[in-house]
Amino acid sequence: MTRRGALAAILILGTIVLADRMSDNKMITARQQYEMGIPNLYSYYTDVVRSDYWSKSLKFSRGRVIGEVGGALIKQPTIFGYSPDEETAKKRLVAKNPHLKWLLMYGALKDVYWVAILLYYGPWGLLIWLLLVYRLFRDGTHLARDGPTDSDIVLGRVQQIIVVLALISAMVYATPGYRGFSFYFWMLAGLTI
Protein backbone atom coordinates (compact mmCIF):
# COMPACT_ATOMS: atom_id res chain seq x y z
CA MET A 1 0.00 0.00 0.00
CA THR A 2 1.34 3.39 -0.90
CA ARG A 3 1.42 6.32 1.47
CA ARG A 4 -1.38 7.95 -0.52
CA GLY A 5 -3.55 4.86 -0.01
CA ALA A 6 -2.64 4.73 3.68
CA LEU A 7 -3.52 8.39 4.10
CA ALA A 8 -6.84 7.87 2.33
CA ALA A 9 -7.57 4.91 4.62
CA ILE A 10 -6.76 7.00 7.70
CA LEU A 11 -8.98 9.86 6.56
CA ILE A 12 -11.89 7.54 5.72
CA LEU A 13 -11.56 5.63 8.99
CA GLY A 14 -11.22 8.86 10.95
CA THR A 15 -14.32 10.32 9.30
CA ILE A 16 -16.33 7.19 10.11
CA VAL A 17 -15.18 7.17 13.74
CA LEU A 18 -15.84 10.90 14.11
CA ALA A 19 -19.32 10.60 12.59
CA ASP A 20 -20.08 7.66 14.86
CA ARG A 21 -18.90 9.58 17.93
CA MET A 22 -20.88 12.67 17.00
CA SER A 23 -24.09 10.70 16.52
CA ASP A 24 -23.59 8.87 19.84
CA ASN A 25 -22.88 12.10 21.69
CA LYS A 26 -26.28 13.52 20.71
CA MET A 27 -28.17 10.55 22.08
CA ILE A 28 -26.59 10.16 25.52
CA THR A 29 -25.68 12.65 28.22
CA ALA A 30 -22.16 13.47 29.35
CA ARG A 31 -22.80 11.65 32.65
CA GLN A 32 -23.86 8.50 30.77
CA GLN A 33 -20.75 8.78 28.62
CA TYR A 34 -18.60 8.96 31.74
CA GLU A 35 -20.31 5.95 33.31
CA MET A 36 -19.95 3.95 30.11
CA GLY A 37 -16.27 4.89 29.81
CA ILE A 38 -16.73 6.81 26.54
CA PRO A 39 -14.37 9.78 26.44
CA ASN A 40 -16.06 13.07 25.59
CA LEU A 41 -13.32 14.73 23.54
CA TYR A 42 -15.23 18.01 23.24
CA SER A 43 -15.31 18.49 27.03
CA TYR A 44 -11.61 17.54 27.30
CA TYR A 45 -10.65 20.69 25.48
CA THR A 46 -13.47 23.03 26.55
CA ASP A 47 -13.08 22.27 30.28
CA VAL A 48 -9.54 23.58 30.14
CA VAL A 49 -10.70 27.17 29.62
CA ARG A 50 -13.28 27.25 32.43
CA SER A 51 -12.12 29.03 35.59
CA ASP A 52 -14.23 26.93 37.99
CA TYR A 53 -12.69 23.79 36.51
CA TRP A 54 -9.17 25.07 37.19
CA SER A 55 -9.94 26.30 40.70
CA LYS A 56 -11.34 22.90 41.73
CA SER A 57 -8.68 21.00 39.84
CA LEU A 58 -5.76 22.89 41.33
CA LYS A 59 -7.14 22.73 44.85
CA PHE A 60 -8.25 19.12 45.06
CA SER A 61 -6.90 16.89 42.32
CA ARG A 62 -4.22 17.90 39.82
CA GLY A 63 -2.82 20.72 41.89
CA ARG A 64 -2.47 18.47 44.89
CA VAL A 65 -0.72 15.78 42.86
CA ILE A 66 1.59 18.29 41.19
CA GLY A 67 2.39 20.06 44.45
CA GLU A 68 2.75 17.17 46.86
CA VAL A 69 3.72 14.19 44.71
CA GLY A 70 5.74 16.23 42.23
CA GLY A 71 7.45 18.01 45.13
CA ALA A 72 8.32 14.70 46.80
CA LEU A 73 9.70 13.33 43.53
CA ILE A 74 11.89 16.40 43.07
CA LYS A 75 13.12 16.38 46.70
CA GLN A 76 13.90 12.63 46.66
CA PRO A 77 14.57 11.76 43.02
CA THR A 78 15.11 8.23 41.80
CA ILE A 79 16.99 7.78 38.56
CA PHE A 80 14.74 5.09 37.08
CA GLY A 81 11.49 5.76 38.95
CA TYR A 82 9.67 3.59 41.45
CA SER A 83 7.98 1.01 39.22
CA PRO A 84 6.01 0.84 35.96
CA ASP A 85 3.16 -0.69 38.02
CA GLU A 86 0.98 2.09 39.42
CA GLU A 87 0.15 0.44 42.74
CA THR A 88 3.74 -0.63 43.43
CA ALA A 89 5.03 2.85 42.57
CA LYS A 90 2.48 4.45 44.90
CA LYS A 91 3.37 2.09 47.77
CA ARG A 92 7.09 2.72 47.37
CA LEU A 93 6.59 6.48 47.28
CA VAL A 94 4.34 6.41 50.36
CA ALA A 95 6.90 4.25 52.20
CA LYS A 96 9.44 7.07 51.74
CA ASN A 97 6.87 9.85 52.29
CA PRO A 98 4.21 8.82 54.85
CA HIS A 99 2.38 12.16 54.50
CA LEU A 100 1.31 11.00 51.00
CA LYS A 101 -0.85 8.16 52.35
CA TRP A 102 -3.90 9.67 50.59
CA LEU A 103 -2.21 8.75 47.30
CA LEU A 104 -2.95 5.05 47.86
CA MET A 105 -6.69 5.78 47.54
CA TYR A 106 -6.26 8.27 44.68
CA GLY A 107 -7.28 6.78 41.36
CA ALA A 108 -6.59 9.64 38.96
CA LEU A 109 -2.81 9.86 39.20
CA LYS A 110 -2.56 9.20 35.47
CA ASP A 111 -4.45 12.44 34.78
CA VAL A 112 -1.30 14.28 35.78
CA TYR A 113 0.63 12.49 33.05
CA TRP A 114 4.00 14.19 33.52
CA VAL A 115 4.08 13.49 37.26
CA ALA A 116 2.94 9.91 36.64
CA ILE A 117 5.75 9.32 34.12
CA LEU A 118 8.23 10.82 36.58
CA LEU A 119 6.90 8.52 39.33
CA TYR A 120 6.87 5.36 37.21
CA TYR A 121 10.02 5.78 35.13
CA GLY A 122 11.99 8.61 36.75
CA PRO A 123 13.83 11.46 35.05
CA TRP A 124 15.46 9.12 32.52
CA GLY A 125 12.10 7.75 31.42
CA LEU A 126 10.64 11.25 31.10
CA LEU A 127 13.68 12.38 29.10
CA ILE A 128 13.43 9.37 26.76
CA TRP A 129 9.70 10.02 26.21
CA LEU A 130 10.31 13.69 25.45
CA LEU A 131 13.16 12.85 23.05
CA LEU A 132 10.91 10.36 21.27
CA VAL A 133 8.14 12.93 20.90
CA TYR A 134 10.67 15.50 19.65
CA ARG A 135 11.97 13.02 17.08
CA LEU A 136 8.44 12.31 15.86
CA PHE A 137 7.75 16.03 15.51
CA ARG A 138 11.04 16.56 13.68
CA ASP A 139 10.30 13.70 11.27
CA GLY A 140 6.84 15.15 10.63
CA THR A 141 8.41 18.54 9.93
CA HIS A 142 10.91 17.01 7.53
CA LEU A 143 8.19 15.10 5.68
CA ALA A 144 5.93 18.17 5.52
CA ARG A 145 8.74 20.30 4.15
CA ASP A 146 10.44 17.86 1.76
CA GLY A 147 7.70 15.33 0.99
CA PRO A 148 7.69 14.22 -2.65
CA THR A 149 3.89 14.17 -2.92
CA ASP A 150 1.02 16.20 -1.55
CA SER A 151 -0.15 13.26 0.54
CA ASP A 152 3.30 13.05 2.18
CA ILE A 153 3.13 16.74 3.03
CA VAL A 154 -0.33 16.29 4.57
CA LEU A 155 0.88 13.23 6.49
CA GLY A 156 3.77 15.25 7.91
CA ARG A 157 1.45 18.08 9.00
CA VAL A 158 -0.96 15.63 10.62
CA GLN A 159 1.96 14.07 12.51
CA GLN A 160 3.03 17.51 13.74
CA ILE A 161 -0.50 18.31 14.89
CA ILE A 162 -0.99 15.05 16.76
CA VAL A 163 2.37 15.43 18.52
CA VAL A 164 1.46 18.95 19.67
CA LEU A 165 -1.97 17.71 20.82
CA ALA A 166 -0.28 14.89 22.74
CA LEU A 167 2.01 17.31 24.57
CA ILE A 168 -0.72 19.82 25.39
CA SER A 169 -3.35 17.30 26.41
CA ALA A 170 -0.87 15.34 28.54
CA MET A 171 -0.67 18.37 30.82
CA VAL A 172 -4.37 18.06 31.64
CA TYR A 173 -5.44 14.49 30.88
CA ALA A 174 -3.83 11.12 30.26
CA THR A 175 -4.74 11.35 26.58
CA PRO A 176 -1.64 9.46 25.35
CA GLY A 177 -2.91 6.48 27.36
CA TYR A 178 -6.28 6.25 25.59
CA ARG A 179 -6.45 3.47 23.03
CA GLY A 180 -8.01 5.54 20.25
CA PHE A 181 -5.52 8.36 20.57
CA SER A 182 -2.58 5.96 20.91
CA PHE A 183 -3.69 4.06 17.82
CA TYR A 184 -3.64 7.18 15.63
CA PHE A 185 -0.49 8.55 17.29
CA TRP A 186 1.60 5.40 16.71
CA MET A 187 0.10 4.62 13.31
CA LEU A 188 1.01 8.11 12.09
CA ALA A 189 4.43 7.77 13.68
CA GLY A 190 5.00 4.55 11.75
CA LEU A 191 3.86 6.08 8.49
CA THR A 192 5.92 9.23 9.01
CA ILE A 193 9.20 7.60 9.95
Image (spheres, rainbow, N blue to C red):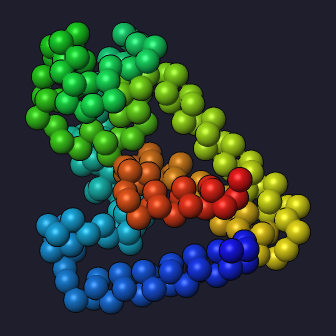
Residue 165 seen: no
46 relative position to 185: left or right: left
Q: What residue is at 69 percent from the left and 43 percent from the top? A: 135
Residue 123 in percent (x, y) is at: 49, 22
Q: What residue is at 65 percent from the left and 66 percent from the top? A: 158
57 relative position to 3: left or right: left
Q: What residue is at 33 percent from the left and 89 percent from the top? A: 23
Residue 154 in percent (x, y) is at: 73, 72
46 relative position to 7: left or right: left
Residue 35 in percent (x, y) is at: 14, 67
The quadrant in which residue 148 appears is bottom right
Frontmost residue, 24 versus 3: 3
Position above or below: 123 against 8: above
Frontmost residue, 64 versus 151: 151
Position above or below: 170 against 118: below
The quadrant in which residue 58 appears is top left
The quadrant in which residue 117 appears is top left
Q: What residue is at 26 percent from the left and 24 percent from the top? A: 89
5 relative position to 76: left or right: right
Frontmost residue, 86 versus 61: 86
Residue 54 seen: yes
